[in-house]
């Protein structure tokens, strides 16, 4: 059974055909799906607006060039990936053959890289409140669902999705190092109130205002 890329079955068929072919014209799509070229054009426009489809001009002899429609690079995210399975296999093998210390180092190196990247991105901000709002905006741009509020003299940063949830569920080192990342990044004694990797619906970090 094919995965669902779009709620409209015709657009899903177009995406599947473009993925398999590498690119097709409106006329070719019309013949394959058995709807009018005008109908295909409307569906392609909808997919183009979503950033899923693009096109290039292709000249065929004398006359106006035709257009070949194809999937964009970002459309590749519509198709299932097994990155988490690969990561888990690598980490399990590393733990088995190189020991727990090597696993700890891997997550520590990842934390160091993230601290460096985020510090550079937030370098123009001053004060804990501006820094936290900048961090929230950065995380949202990366696809995180984030809330930030303040109560009883502390900020609470809450995230509702974890991009490495399956890895964190087995390797708690990921969560430990994420907490350490916030401590180094914000220069505060940040504490973790709950964690998605441990079965909670969100990760909540408590950050002292001073």
Image (cartoon, rainbow, N blue to C red):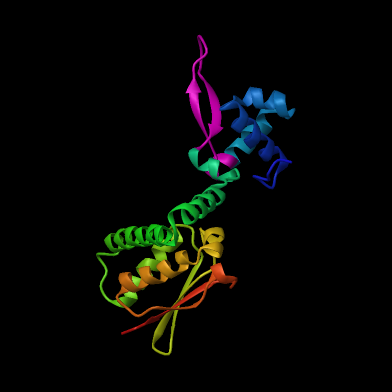
Q: Locate residue 18 relative to residue 104 in the image: left or right.
A: right
Instruction: Give the number of marks.
Output: 0
Q: Residue at x 34, y 83 (%)?
A: 209
Q: Locate residue 184 relative to residue 30 in the image: left or right.
A: left
Closest to the observer: 174 or 156?
A: 174
Image position, residue 66 (x, y; %): 54, 21
Position above or below: 187 against 10: below
Closest to the observer: 123 or 96?
A: 96
Closest to the observer: 125 or 118?
A: 118
Image position, residue 105 (x, y; %): 37, 60
Q: Residue furthest top?
A: 62
Q: Locate residue 121 relative to residue 153 in the image: left or right.
A: left
Image position, residue 194 (x, y; %): 52, 76
User: Could you tell me which quadrant the N terminus lies in?
Assistant: top right
Q: Residue at x 54, y 45 (%)?
A: 77
Q: Residue at x 68, y 33 (%)?
A: 39
User: Could you tell me which quadrant the C terminus lies in?
Assistant: bottom left
Magenta-span inclusion, residue 25: no
Magenta-span inclusion, residue 49: yes
Position above or below: 173 against 44: below
Image quadrant where residue 25 sits:
top right
Q: Residue furthest bottom?
A: 152
Q: Residue at x 46, y 68 (%)?
A: 175
* Residue bounds of the magenta highlight: 47-72
Position above or below: 19 against 147: above
Image quadrant where residue 100 sits:
bottom left
């Amino acid at each position: 059974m094919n995965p669902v890329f779009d709620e409209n079955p015709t657009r899903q068929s177009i995406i599947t055909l473009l993925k398999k072919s590498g690119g097709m014209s409106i006329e070719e799509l019309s013949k394959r799906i058995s709807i009018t070229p005008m109908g295909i054009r409307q569906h392609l426009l909808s997919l183009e607006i979503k950033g899923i489809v693009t096109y290039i001009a292709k000249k065929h002899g004398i006359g106006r060039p035709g257009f070949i429609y194809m999937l964009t690079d970002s459309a590749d995210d519509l198709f299932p990936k097994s990155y988490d399975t690969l990561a888990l296999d690598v980490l399990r093998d590393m733990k088995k053959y190189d020991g727990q210390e090597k696993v700890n180092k891997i997550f520590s190196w990842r934390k160091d890289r993230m601290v460096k990247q985020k510090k550079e991105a937030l370098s123009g901000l001053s004060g804990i409140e501006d820094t936290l709002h900048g961090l929230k905006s950065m995380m949202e741009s990366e696809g995180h669902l984030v809330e930030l509020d303040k109560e009883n003299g502390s900020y609470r940063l809450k995230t509702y999705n974890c991009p490495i949830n399956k890895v964190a569920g087995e390797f708690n080192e990921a969560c430990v190092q994420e907490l350490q990342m916030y401590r180094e990044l914000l220069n505060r004694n940040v504490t973790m109130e709950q964690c998605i990797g441990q079965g909670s619906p969100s990760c909540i970090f408590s950050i002292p205002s001073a």
